[in-house]
Amino acid sequence: MKFAPVVLSSLLFVAASACAQAPVDCPSLPASSGLQWQQQAQSGFLVCRAATSDGREVLSLMLSQRDPGIPLTRSLRQEKGSFAGESMYWYQPDLGGQQPPGYAERRISVVKLDKGRYAQIALYPDSSQELGTLQQLAQGMNLTPSAVADGR
């Protein structure tokens, strides 16, 4: 009869692990932004993609337990900003010398939130005005502890 307690404790452990790893939500977006998140949770990270009502992706946010390791070179550094209370710089993405339409306004950054937690933010505006709006939106995002639990 030792089998039943072992099975029961194993099931409880699996259930507790599943609850601890349940996907969390993306940070809230202001209703006035007109944007909606598309969310994808994977093991160790959460990807949030903000799209306009016509489906155009304008912002992506990845919350991760690991440094994304994206090389952000000083020659591509643009504006200074902040995200989740951390100072950072926006960079033009390195597309291997390619400059597709809208490249001048695209931005990317990686922010170390604290030990073992990172945010990678990418902006895909269609104008310099929308770039400023998206940078302000990103600066005002509230990452609550539950939103980045377990690196998600």
Image: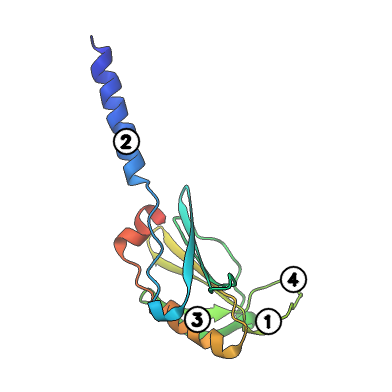
Q: Amino acid at mark 2?
A: Ala
Under tag 1, what secondary structure?
loop
Report, in whole angstroms, how far the alpha carbon at label 1 lies from the one at label 3: 14 Å
Q: Amino acid at mark 1?
A: Gly
Depth check, front residue: 53 or 1:
53
Q: Nearer the viewer, mark 3 or mark 4?
A: 3
Q: Nearer the viewer, mark 1 or mark 4?
A: 1
User: Closer to the N terminus: mark 1 or mark 3?
Assistant: 1
What residue lies at 50% left-to-right and 81% top-to-bottom? Answer: 134
Q: Amino acid at mark 4?
A: Gly
Left or right of 136? Residue 143 is: left
Q: Amino acid at mark 3?
A: Leu
Which numbered disc covers residue 3? none
Which numbered disc covers residue 102? 1
**Residue assigned mark 2:** 15
Which numbered disc covers residue 96? 4
**Residue assigned mark 3:** 134
